[in-house]
Amino acid sequence: MWQTLKEDIQAVFDRDPAARSTWEVAIAYPGFHAILIHRLAHWLWQRRLTTVARFVSHVGRFLTGIEIHPGAKIGRRCFIDHGMGVVIGETSEIGNDVTIYQGVTLGGTSTEPIKRHPTIEDSVTIFSGAAVLGPVTVGRHSRVGAGSVLVTSVPPHSTVVGIPGRVVKIEARHTPTGKAIIDLNSADLPDVIANAVNSLADYVEKLEKKVDELSARQGGLEEKTAEESEVLNKVKELLKNNH
C-alpha cells in the first residue's frame, strides 16, 4: 500500500513540471486525491461492501470533481491531471503509467451487467475531452487526441484523432536505452479536418488545370476546323468557276 502511494506521488512529479513538493501533491492535487480515494473504494468493493464503496466513491467525486466507479480497475502510477469532469465507468480497466486529462470519459455502451467499458493498456495518454466508449481496447503507448470519440479498438503505439476516432499514425518511440516513451505532447497530433480540406483544395486545383488544358485543346480544334472550312470553300469556288 505504501509503495503504491509513493509511486502515485512520484507519477505526479514525473508528468507535471508544476509539482514542487510532496506536500503540495498530497494536499493540492485532485487527481492524486481521486486515485487515492478510489483505491480505498475499490478495496471495499472487492470485499462486497458495495454500498460503503459507492459512498466513498461519491465523497471522492464531491471533493475532486472526478467520478470513478469503485468497480473500475486502475493500475499503478496512474496520473489524472487537472481532472475536473473525468468519468470512469464500472468495468473500465486501466493499466500502469496511464495519463488522463480533464473531461475524459471512459463510458459504457450497454445496459447489461457485462464488460461494457474500455480497457486502457499501459502507458496510454488520453487528452482533454476525449471519450472512449464501449468494451474496446486502447493498445499500450497509444495517444487519444483531445475531443476524440473512440468506439473501436486500436493497436499499440497508435495516435487517434477525430469523431469517430481514427488511427492516423502507428509509431513506436523509445529512449536511447530502449525504454518506451510516455508521450504527453499533443502539439504534433494531426488535424484531420484541416488535412481533409487541404486534400480537397489540391484535388480542385488539379481539376482546374485539367479543365484549362481541355479548353485550350478545344480552342485549337475550333481554330483548325475554321481554317479547314475556309480552304474547302475556296476549293469549291474554284471548282465552280472552272465549270
Image (tube, helix red, strand yellow):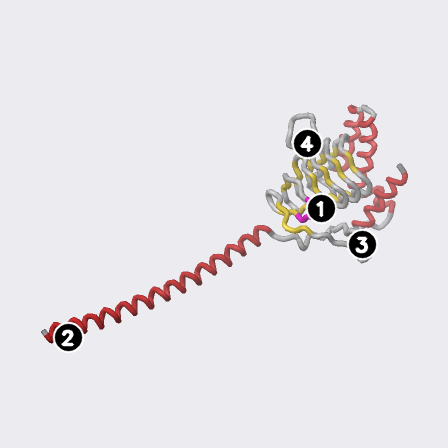
Q: If you read the primary sequence from the N terminus, does the residue marked by circle 1 or circle 2 appear first?
A: 1
- Please state the extent of the stretch shown in magenta in the rendering: 155-159
Between label 1 and label 2, give the one nearer the viewer: 2
Q: Are marks 1 and 3 in contact (CB under 8 Å)?
A: no
| Residue 142, image x, y percentages | 71, 47
Residue 156 is labelled as 1
Q: Which quadrant of the figure has residue 84?
A: top right
Q: Quadrant of the N terminus?
A: top right
Instruction: Say what amino acid the circle numbered 4 marks.
Output: Arg
| Residue 184, image x, y percentages | 74, 50
Residue identifier under label 2: 238
Distance of mark 1 from mark 4, alpha carbons? Answer: 21 Å
| Residue 179, image x, y percentages | 80, 52
Q: Secondary structure at mark 1?
A: loop
Q: If you read the primary sequence from the N terminus, does the residue marked by circle 1 or circle 4 appear first?
A: 4
156 in the magenta segment: yes
